[in-house]
Amino acid sequence: MADTVQQIKDRLTIVDVVSNYVKLERSGANLRARCPFHAERTPSFFVSPDRGTYHCFGCNVGGDIFSFVEQIEGLDFKGALKVLADKAGVTIEYSRGRKEDKDERERLFELLEVATIFYSSRMNDAALQYLKERGLDKKTMHSFRLGFAGNEWSEASDYLKGKKFTEKEILDAGLAKKTERGSLVDKFRNRIMFPIADSAGRIIGFSGRIFGEDASPEAPKYLNSPETVLFRKSRILYGFDKAKLAMRKHNCAVLVEGQIDLLASHQAGWGNTVAVSGTAFTPEHAALLKRMTENLVIALDADTAGIKAAGRAARAALQGGLNVKVAKLPSELDPADLILSAGGGSPPGGKEAWSQVIREAKDIITFLLDTLEEHAKAKDIFRRSVESIVLPFLSDVVSPIAREQYVREIAKRLNVSEQAVAEALEKQPTMTKAMEDRPNEITSKSNTVEGFERARQAYSIVLWQRSLPKPEIDVALYEGELEAAIGPEAFEKLKALGDTEREKMRFAAERLHGKSRTVVREAKALLSIILKEQLARELAAATRALRQAETAGDEKEIEVRMAVCNVLTTKIAQLHEVR
Ligand SMILES: [Zn+2]
């Protein structure tokens, strides 16, 4: 695997990788962007092409291409490796170790992959017929690896045991339950199987859909894998792995509910569609999407439950910093029905109708205002519902410009002043405070550690200059002067800083001095300030000691202390002359 890592590093630069997710702009020797990991208005996310690293001064994350992909796609190291290997066109060389050598997660991935192949080999005519009736073609079914789980009690479990997976592994993967008599029973039976992948495309769970006449009425329509080590519902969006590129390309994501709607939407050309599966849309989902795009169109069913779900999803999405629009589907139709409906007519059906619904999606506030106005029988009821339903949404809107526009719109519709709306809004509890820019930790340091901060700043210059092919300052000399100025104890503290911290410091120094043509002078000035502060502290201590000696009337001690004070005062005076 070490080979694979190196090969990937040889082929992909940090800029190749990062620019897939964020828009980078030049900034001296570096590139910078608004950080994809926290909400901010001014860019504090820096990328160094020379060192192949990135760092954000806002939320303090940093690392190389692998950690970047891990963080941005919510993957473990191996997942990131797979994503980058695919991108670089490198084949991953797994060490062909014995079974016991592989870790638990790796075994589960393998088991789920084998299960996916098994289910797809069991696809039968009845299931195919059902999927065809819902408008799905073979290519779509194939690309999403659909399969079928038969009605036998333990067909899948038996198959997996035959492939040398243990009962514990089958249970851990969420594919079976244990009966009271201790035997395994398949969790999914008589269902169409939709494999659910993580963002690297590895299968982590399933959603099984019941169909046909013999489906018992109390059985749930969709059955999902339970939460496992790999499958975390609140972090997984169905179709995300396939929608990634399209979301980035079109700078927009479409959210539907359920597997069939998702497949139909992809088939209709909307490859940027994702679906929640068996759970509400959470702020975690929003954060996942935010890394690919800032815009979300929510297209859930048009029934009351669907509209309520859309409202909740929109709230979570707004809190996650996404711009949210809501598509209005014709009543009684879900996206798959709409796409399947006859195309070309008037009103249009089929693909065109779906495209129109997405394109005509209204921003969430307008959608709510429209819907409420439609249903409110009196102006008074409308006003109250705006206050109780729309304003909480508005307080989640991150952009102040957008917020102002909405305030204007609401005031117009309610026929009240903008100020009245703004005041009502003020009273709303806000949820987005935590998402606001975090203060830069360098500038927010208290005075007590200011001295050490300055020493750190100087040491940052040392680290940064040393990483350059041609340093502008005499690094060894400067380091020595710094050590002399701050003393060995403080210097040891600087030398003990960890790698991440050191890389962050390189970025900090580069950001501060990188564009300057007077680095040497700036470095010297910094050192002289440190020296002066150090001397001032020593002088303060010496003066205190002198006063103590005076109080005690110790003539000998007074003489010594006086001499020390003199030396220090002279040194400080000399420093001023040099500057
Ligand atoms: Zn950040």
Image: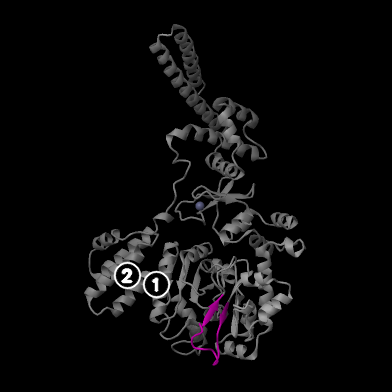
Check disc 2 and give the amino acid type.
Answer: Ile
Locate residue 136: give its quadrant: bottom right
Are dots 2 and 1 in contact, CB under 8 Å? Answer: yes
Marks counted in the figure total 2
Q: Where is residue 579 in the image (x, y as percent from the top left)?
A: 50, 24
Q: How crowded is mark 2: few (under 14 residues within 10 Å), some or many (20 or more)?
A: some
Residue lying at the far front in this picture: please name it: 181
Magenta part of the chain: 207-224
Mark number for residue 15? none
Any part of residue 265 in sight: no
Read off the residue under disc 2: 389
Q: Residues within 10 Å of mark 1 (few under 14, many from 20)?
A: many
Residue lying at the far bottom in this picture: please name it: 213
Read off the residue under disc 1: 311
Mark with earlier residue (2, 1): 1
Check disc 1 and give the amino acid type.
Answer: Gly
Label 1 sits on a secondary structure element that is helix
Q: In this view, does 167 lie above or below 485?
A: below
Q: In this view, does 122 lie above or below 232?
A: below
Separation (CA) of disc 2 from disc 1: 9 Å
Q: In this view, does 451 lie to the left or right of 396?
A: right
Q: Is residue 23 above or below residue 532?
A: below
